[in-house]
Amino acid sequence: MKRGVALFLWLALALAAPLPELYDRLESALGQVRIEAQNQALPALEQAQSLLRQEGEVLPPVLRDAALLNLQEARQALLRKSRADLEARLLLVRHLLGKALLDGFLSGTGEERAALLGRLARATGLPQPLVQEVRSLPPEGARRLLEAHYLQAMAEDLGRSLSAASRPEAYLALARAYARYLVIQDSPQSTLKAQDFVQALAKVSGGEPFRAEVAALREKTLAWRKGLQPSPKPQAQAPTPTPSSPLSSPTQAAPPPAPSSTPISPPPSPVQTAPAVETFYVASWASPELASQIRSVAYALGYNYVFEFLADLDRIAQTVGLASSALGRGDTESARAHLASGLFIFQKNAEPILSLVNPDLSELVRKGFTTLYQAPGARVIDTFVLYDAIQELARQFQEGPRSTPWLNFQLFLLNLAGIPRATFFLVAAALAFFPLYLVRLTFGGRNVYWNLLALAFLLLFLPILAEGLSYFGAIMADYGNLPWLAALNNLSIGQGLLPYLSWGLSVFLVVVLATAGLRGIAAQFGLLKERGAEVAPTAERLPSTTLTSETIVEWDEEF
């Protein structure tokens, strides 16, 4: 009993690992990820994902989900042998962890504060002299000094992007600035938005003119840094990193993925002053206190009118619809890109408001986005649940919160998408062969009616077999470096009209074959003698045989 209690306490402590220990274990796993050694890198990425899922409670949910999404994309980049994309994902993961480490450092005390600062330096490449200087400062002074340092590095990176001789070089420099922004994104002095970086990166990667957007980002970065100068300590102590600083080292550069597939923690927009006349109308179902709180959050996010917020909800629903279309044609990568874009908009613009209306449903929607993005073998019907949930949130925003047990149950089932659901259907498909084997073993090929019944059984189990085969293809495409097997996803009934009609045809054939087989078997057992001519000879012979037996008995008695 004592051993059991001790083991339970040990497991509880392990699950509640502090942030420095979590970072050390994640960094140990990420350090093994190299594109030259896929056999070692894939288990390392799986280990990192498991750590975040099981022990990531110390991280804010938004940061944890974003890190998980980027680790999943790192796996895809590794399978595609895309070195740049792999480095970009790992860079984003480290800086997202750096955001949590910075927050913990500013609010920590004593040895914990020193441990967090050391991990922050490793995660974001802070120079050692700056670390020594920050260690002795109070939280506010340390925040301003670190913020000034990151901003200086961002300005240098943006300058390199503007003067780059090639588009890839500009992309890498802009990516470095973006990653560093993630660490200080919620600063009160922020004049930037994550969406600004995403749009600029999209222009660079899409071959469009981008220098005007990058120049605007650099001007905002310099203005942000200039806003820190009135404080004497940060001004006197802010270092100027040299080009050889680890923050600006080209070896750390990595192009981020397509902007639509890079979900990050949502940075708040610059603080805005509410207009003198309230323009963001909140329906009468909300209490005055709640209505005021919703308006404050809406104004802070940049919404002056309700229709602007509802338009963003429509954009989120549109990304889910595009993901559904991509899944329907077997394009898993595009579907994940659309889901990542929807998750980004939801976390950045919608969830802060909707969590005030219905926090439980908002959290389920966010988890649904994350699950579908990561799940191998996601189906078109899965996106319908997510779409309905977004529409329900929009209705509740206008009409007030209400209980939705059926929708909540569907969203709960949505969390089983991926490996759990694939395992279920693979096992069911394997077991489906056993009754077919028994039918064949028992009757073999000697009886045509039993063969018809066996064929009916086969068609009855055909949807299960197709579903198992489709999940096998999805898993091999994601984890076996065989992307062409993703086409097997289209065998699933949940994918579109053709599989659905094929299932209907198989059911019709089941009815026909089962009827023919069972009718023949019933006739052979003499159960249909009043129905068919095929049993007439049997019916005629039975009385004759009976009479002959009776005659023989009478002769024996007379003798």
Image (cartoon, rainbow, N blue to C red):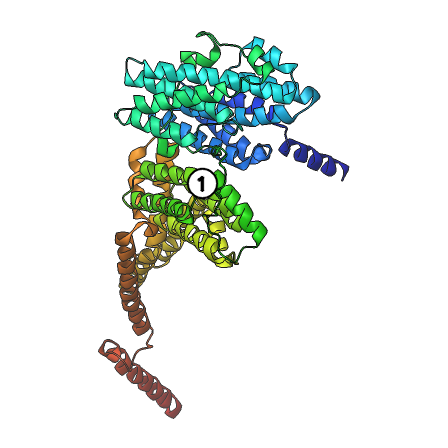
Q: Nearer the viewer, residue 419 or 243?
A: 243
Percent x, y for residue 483? 31, 33
Q: Alpha-carbon neighbours of circle 1 within 10 Å: few (<14), some, or many (≥20)?
A: many
Q: Quadrant of the C terminus?
A: bottom left
Q: Nearer the viewer, residue 328 or 179?
A: 179
Quarter-wise, where is residue 111 in the image? top right
Quarter-wise, where is residue 548 in the image? bottom left
Task: Work out whether 550 lies above or below 327.
Answer: below
Residue at horizontal 43 percent and vertical 34 percent from the top: 263
Left or right, residue 170 beside residue 399: left
Q: Secondary structure at mark 1?
A: helix
Tell me the amino acid under the disc marked 1. Answer: Asn
Quarter-wise, where is residue 517 in the image? bottom left
Percent x, y for residue 100? 56, 28
Percent x, y for residue 556? 38, 87
Task: Work out whether 435 lies above or below 34.
Answer: below
Q: Nearer the viewer, residue 551 or 414?
A: 414
Task: Work out whether 129 lies above or below 229.
Answer: above
Left or right, residue 446 beside residue 114: left
Percent x, y for residue 269? 47, 34
Residue behind mark 1: 349
Q: Can the viewer see residue 82 in this picture? A: no
Q: Nearer the viewer, residue 378 or 126?
A: 126
Left or right, residue 439 beside residue 40: left
